[in-house]
Image (cartoon, rainbow, N blue to C red):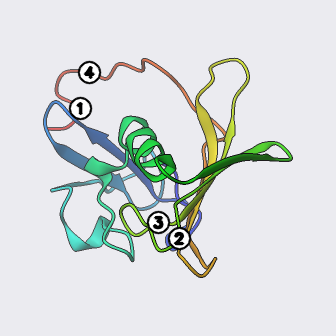
Amino acid sequence: MDFVRPHAGATLIYSPETQAARVWPFGFPRFPSLALDPGNPMIRGPHGHRVDQSDLGMLLRNVRALGKGGVMRIDGAHLVVEGASGRTVAGVHRYRLRFDPATALPVEVSSEDEFGALIESVKMDDLRIDITFPQDFFV
């Protein structure tokens, strides 16, 4: 992940194998880098989101759970999934997703609370699939 806010230019990579996150505060691969636990408050979102719970699989499970009993509709280029009245999943009442036609993966996602206030917005404009790292990358 390359961050725009609150730390513009910071890069974070999470390894599910080692369950560790590596952060480059000034961008990859600049010195220094930090190895952090995914629960570390320095890399948790303002609403408690953890990097180890922010993968595409978790997103799609949450979208599916929110859509059960809710409403799904197309709004321009976005799929909007809204929970039933008063229903939230992980604090989210509405997702807006835009999918890449080539991979069918979400490349833009925003989440909103019950009042329509933006919780989080993620844009994956350089999504890469099946990247391999050296074995000692997270050590």
Disc 4 marks a residue whose amino acid type is: Pro
Contact? badges 2 and 3 (CB < 8 Å) = no
Q: In front: mark 2 or mark 3?
A: 2
Q: In front: mark 3 or mark 1?
A: 3
Residue bearing the label numbered 3: 92
Question: What is the quadrant of the C terminus in the image?
Answer: top left
Give SS at disc 3.
Answer: loop
- Label 4 vs label 2: CA separation? 47 Å
Sequence-first disc among 4 and 2: 2
- For mark 3, does the 10 Å Cα neighbourhood hold few (<14), some (14 to 19), or many (20 or more) residues? many
Residue bearing the label numbered 1: 137
Percent across and percent down for residue 111 are: 56, 62
Residue bearing the label numbered 4: 134
Give SS at disc 2.
Answer: loop
Give SS at disc 4.
Answer: loop
Residue bearing the label numbered 2: 85
Disc 2 marks a residue whose amino acid type is: Ser
- The answer to whether residue 34 is above or below residue 118 is above
